[in-house]
Image (cartoon, rainbow, N blue to C red):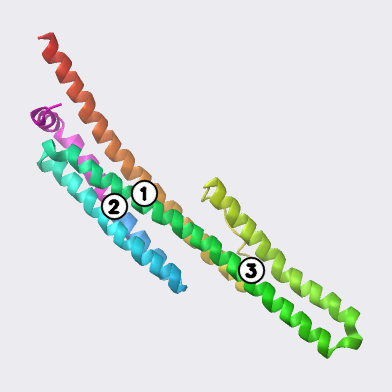
Amino acid sequence: MTRSDISAVFNAKRDARQNKLDDLAQHSRLLKDRIAKTQQLLSDSILRARLTEESHMVDQYVGAVESLARAIAQRPSEAIAQLTPYLQAYEQLQQNIEEASDLLEKGAKAAQSEALGRANEATRAMLVMCGPSFPLLLFIATRIIRSITEPLDSLSSRFKAMTESNDLRLELDQERNDEIGALGLCLNTFVHKLHEILTQIRSSAEQVAEVTEEISASAKGQAQGAESQ
């Protein structure tokens, strides 16, 4: 397929092509806005730093989308060459999102370990100070430990199942009126935003794929017409 063939394809379908480019630009803007909103919801410095890095990748992704759109609209002969930077930016952004999900899982496990350590310390202190009331204290300590570890185990298992199945529609328990419920709400909000981001990325990729398929199909049709003449 020659440069003149690509130019002829775009000149013949200009309105439809422009509509798809407008949709692609809108999806890119939504992606950037939702990254910024997600970053505002987080208080953890590590996750905020990760999202800052991800925001820079979004800027690169949006820039690649805009370059591709300009090439399609103004320099159709260069459109194919612009696909590589776009796909690279898309893959890097997707990888960064997956790494952020892994970081959240590690954070949940760290919170679980810290809670277990505190529970064990509390148990030892009570045993030392209240030896005569050992049976009662043991029962109370067991209930306290279970009230901490069981929801954390559930939270960790749920998040692990979410990451292994790549299903961001699953939700964590956020109904508890304590720190664990607050953590579940924060994680649910973050995962929901990630799901929206991935949906926007997938939609943008489909738009580019459609434009590319139209270019290839039209070029083949012109080549076959030229051969028949």
Where, quadrant-wise, is the N terminus in this rendering?
top left
Identified by mark 3, the residue type is: Gln
Pair 1/3: label in front? 3
The numbered mark at residue 89 is none
Residue 39 image position (x, y, % from top left) = 40, 67
Q: Quadrant of the C terminus?
A: top left
Query: Could you tell me the amino acid type at mark 2?
Result: Ser
Give me the disc on residue 112.
3
Query: In this rendering, would 163 be left or right of 142?
Result: left
Q: Residue at x 75, y 69 (%)?
A: 146
Q: Is residue 26 above or below residue 218?
A: below
Q: Say whether disc 1 or disc 3 marks the residue closer to the N-terminus.
A: 3
Q: Which mark is residue 200?
A: 1
In space, the residues marked 1 and 3 are separated at their CA atoms by 33 Å
* 204 sits to left or right of 148: left
Q: Nearer the viewer, residue 10 or 46?
A: 46
- Observer-nearest of 172 and 226: 226
Percent position of residue 28, x then y: 29, 52
Q: Is residue 177 magenta?
A: no
Magenta extent: 1-26
Q: Main secondary structure of the magenta part?
A: helix
Asked if disc 1 and disc 3 are in contact, CB closer than 8 Å, the reply is no
Q: Residue at x 51, y 51 (%)?
A: 168
